[in-house]
Amino acid sequence: MEEVEQISVFSENKPGKLKRVTEILKEKGINIRAITIASSNSYGIIKILVNNPLKAYQALKEKGLSVALIPVLAVEIEDKPGGLSKIAEVLKEHNINVEDAYGFVIQSHNKAVFIMKVEDIKKTRLILEGENIFLLTRRDLYEI
Amino acid sequence: MNQNSNIEFISRESLEKLQLSRLKETLRRVYSFSPFYKNLFKKEGLTPSKIKSLKDLPLIPFTTRKDLRENFPYGLLSIPLNDVVRLHTSTGTTGKPKAVFFSRNDINSSAELIARSMKMTGAEKGDVFQNMMGYGLFTGGLISHYGAERLGLLVIPAGAGNTERQIELMFDFKTTVVHITPSYALYLADVMEEKGFNPKKDFNLRILYLGAEPYSEKTREKIERIFTVDAYNSYGLSEMNGPGVAFECKYKEGMHLWEDNFIMEIVDPSTGEPLKEGEEGELVLTSINKEAMPIIRYRTGDLTYIYPEKCNCSRVHRRISRIKGRADDMLIIRGVNVFPSEVERILMDLPEVGRNYQIVLDRKKDLDKMKVRVEIKRDFFDGSLDHLKKVEIKIKAKLKDELMVTPEIELLEPSSLPRTTGKAKRIIDKREI
C-alpha cells in the first residue's frame, strides 16, 4: 500500500513566501486539499496536501525550493462530536504518539479527514485497520 | 621614586638606549631558542648582531597572526618550557588558538605595566577595584588583577557578566575603580536604573578603564556623565602583554605606549612601509621586555597613529590615538575578537549548511548582537521542523564554543541570500561607534 504523501516546504517567515509556493502549484494545475504552516521564529514549514504530490514536489524542487515528500496517514472520521475522540482512544491504547497532525472536513456533517504523522506508519496502519478505522488511499484523497 | 629617575620621565635618549639594549638581548634569545625565529633570521641571512641600532629593526621581517598559528604551540617559545609559569590564549580564535606564554618575570613585568598605568590615572591604595574583565584563558582578567594587587588596591575578581551581582558588589563594597568594555558600561547603567539605582549617586565609582573594543569620544563622554567618573582609554593585546600596553594619562589625549617594554612602528597596512609620526597606519609592536615569548615586529592589525607632540604630562613614552579600526576584517563583538574566516570555517564544517551565509552585527540596548544567517543545504531538508530546530541549536552551540560569542541563528532557504557578482556581502555591521 502506498502511503499518502504530504508536501513540506521550508520557508522563511516573510511576506510573499506563501505566494511563491502557491503560484508554482497554480501554474502546474495542482489543487490544494489542505494546508497548514508550522513556524519557528524566522522560518517555518508549509505543509500541503495536494491532488498530485509527486508533480508538486518536482515543480517546487525545480524552482529551487527546499521541499520534502512526507508519508502521512489520512484517517477518515465522522464529522460529529466524538469523531476524533474515537481515533485518539485507539492511538492512546496502543501507545502511538502523533508527531504532527491537522484535519479538514470533506462533506459537511458527514466526513472529515484527520492527517497525521507518526513514527511507525506501517504499524499504525495495521492497528487502525484492525480497529475498523478507514484510511484513505492516495486515490481516495486525490479524487476528493 | 622621584620623577627624574622614574622610567616614565627619563630622557628620550636614555629610553632609546634602554630599548636598544633590551632589543639586542631579546633578539639573541629568540634566535637561540625559538625555531621559528631561527628559521626566519636564516632565511633573511640575518643574525642578531646585524641589528646595531633601532633603525636596523626593519631589516627583520614582520611576524603575523598566521605565523603564530602555524607555529602553534611552541614555535615562538624562547625559554625552556619548564620555566614557563602561565599559558594564555588570545580571544576569539579557534581550531589552533594563539598560545601566549609567560615566565614568572613576564607575569611581574606585565603586572607592573598595569600597576603603572593605573597609578598614572590616580588609582591608589585604598581604592576598591572591581575587575569585570573575563578571567581564564583571556589575559584581560588575570593580568589586570595582578597589576591592581601590585598597586595595593582591594581587588574584587568579579569577572565578566552577571550584571545584577556586579551591581550588588559595587554597592556593597563601594567599588571605586572598574575595568570594563564601553558597551558593557552603558548596559550596566541601564540595569542600575531598572533596579532603581542612580548610577551617579548610589555608588562610589571614580575611575573607569575602558578597553577591548573600539568606541568614540562621544561614548566616553556619555559614560563619564552617566556615572560621574573619569573614564580612561586602554589598549592591549594578548600577544604582547594582555592589557596595559598603552594607557591614557590624566589628560586623556591619546594612550602612552610603554616604550620601555615595546618598540612601536606604524606601517602602511598594504605595503608594510614605515609611516611617519602623525600618519595613520597599522601598529607594529616588538616586545623587548619579555622572556617566554617575545614577538618581533608583530602586525597587530590595529589602525592608529602616533601623536607627534609631547604630552602635557611630560612623560617620555609617546602616545597612540584611540584605535581607528582594523587593517584586516577582524570584528570585535562584545570585546571578543571574531574573524569572519573562522565563522566561515565553522559553518562549512557542518554538513547541513549550504555555501552562503551572512553575519549581521547590531547593537541593542548598548550590547552587541551577532546574528548569523545561514542557508541550509537543499538536500538536508527532510520536512521536519524538529530537525531544523536541532540544526539551529547545533550551529549556535558550535559557533559559541569556538568563537566565545553567542550568536542568534537564522536559517534561510537555499540561494536566498543576495549575491553580488563575485563576492557576496558577508558582513553587515549596523553598529554605530
Image (cartoon, rainbow, N blue to C red):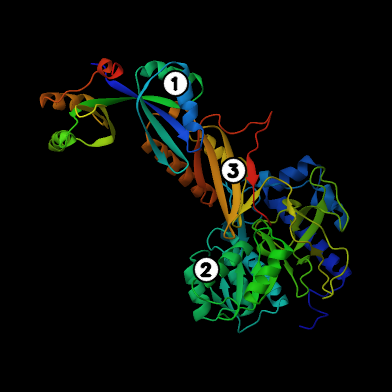
Precedes in sequence: disc 3 or disc 2: 2
Q: What is the CA distance from the residue labelled 3 to the residue labelled 1? A: 34 Å
Label placed on residue B118: none
* Residue designated by label 3: B359
* Residue designated by label 2: B191
Q: What is the CA distance from the residue labelled 2 to the residue labelled 1? A: 52 Å
Name the chain under label 2: B
Q: Is residue B327 left or right of residue B168?
A: right
Name the chain under label 1: A
What's the residue type where badge 3 is placed?
Answer: Ile
Tell me if label 3 and label 1 are in contact, CB under 8 Å.
Answer: no
Label placed on residue A25: 1
Residue at mark 2 shares a chain with residue at mark 1 = no
Q: Is residue B284 above or below residue A68?
A: below
Tell me if label 2 and label 1 are in contact, CB under 8 Å.
Answer: no
Q: Is residue B399 visible?
A: no
What's the residue type where badge 2 is placed?
Answer: Val
